[in-house]
Amino acid sequence: MNLKTIAQRAGVSTATVSNVINGNNHKVSEETRRRVNEIIKETNYKPNAMARSLAKKESRIIGLVIPYLGADEDFFTNPYNAHIIAAIERCVRNEDYYLMMRCVHDPREIIPLLSSWNVDGAFFLGIFPDEVKEIKKLIDSPVVFIDTYAPGEGIVNVGIEDYRGGYLSARYLIGKGHKNLALVTPVIGEEGVIMERYKGFATACKESGVSFGESNIFYTDTTYINAVEAGQNIGFSNGGYTAVACLSDIVAFGVIEGLSQCGIRVPYDVSVIGFDNLPNCEYMTPKLTSVAQNFDIKAEKAWEYLLRMINGEKDLAVDERLPIRVAERFSVRNLLEQ
């Protein structure tokens, strides 16, 4: 079955059938559209998606790039990825687009594939600043970055108030009477999400007269198993910490387990605050207090900007930082009520 056969059965031209398949409904009467669609359904005709893409100069495919993953890693290692991907996919699906996701080690290596698939646009999650300029230069499709810091590059980025998040994390703990704080973080780079959260945290400590330095910092990557080790290191450190701030929830989950293995109870002996407010925070014992961001709003904003670019706003440049808050649960003890 091909376009010509369908046209003959419907008594119309192949151009009319093509208009029906490609959604050019203003060129076809409702009765003709109904008749052609019935024949397509009866014959189980499957239009060639690549041919349609070339003909219409659009694919309805949106790329999503998750960078810095090795060959043996997957995005489920960090639940944050799973939740933001789910929120983005929902937005894309609701507008009748399709999401093509790819995990890569180097985000620049995906550009030829995105071009060959003729994607209508793409999202890049958490790209390092020095790679943004090259990505923007090499890719022709509209691109929206998420959780990326690249001032002066004229990109569209949607993130959160990372500096304020770090600041709120420290201020919340200090407001509960905690003066000896530990911070569990990935290696702090020159610029980006982690640096902004760290700077906010350190500033809040300084303003409150709380001592905070390198001896208060415990480094780990953003994985549960290594965060367990960080929790154990805190437990054996003899640092006298009364509270631990973690720059992601998955790390907070691991730290709590590591502390527990050292016989340290949360929050009775040591308090813990996370970051992101994953739904999993409700499933922990105790339920985890966390600096909260809204995944749905972040995805909706990113999709809104990408659609605007797809629809003609090619030179759009935005750096939107969405507000955050502390979602209070039961993992932080109020020392002032003793």
Image: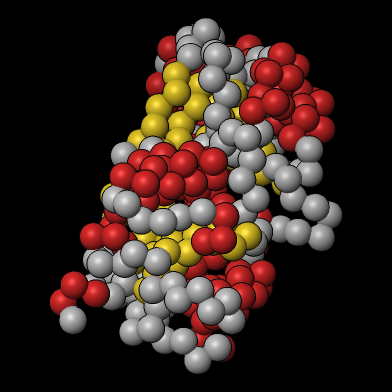
Q: Position of residue 236 (x, y in %)?
A: 59, 81
Nearer-the-camera pick, 108 or 311: 108
Q: Position of residue 334 (x, y in %)?
A: 23, 73
In the image, 228: left or right of 285? right
Q: Residue at x 78, y 38 (%)?
A: 106
Res 61 quadrant in image = top right
**Does 197 appear above or below 13?**
below
Nearer-the-camera pick, 2 or 85: 85
**Does 175 appear above or below 321?**
below
Q: Quadrant of the N terminus?
A: top right
Question: Is residue 54 in sight in this rendering?
Answer: no
Question: Is residue 195 in sight in this rendering?
Answer: yes
Q: Quadrant of the C terminus?
A: bottom left
Q: Residue at x 42, y 64 (%)?
A: 181
Q: Residue at x 45, y 36 (%)?
A: 159
In the image, 113: left or right of 288? right
Q: Position of residue 155 (x, y in %)?
A: 55, 18
Q: Position of residue 274 (x, y in %)?
A: 43, 62
**Does 311 appear above or below 231?**
above
Res 241 quadrant in image = bottom left
Q: Residue at x 51, y 74 (%)?
A: 239
* Total labels drawn: 0
In the image, 15: left or right of 175? right
Report the residue that reaches farthest toward the left: 337
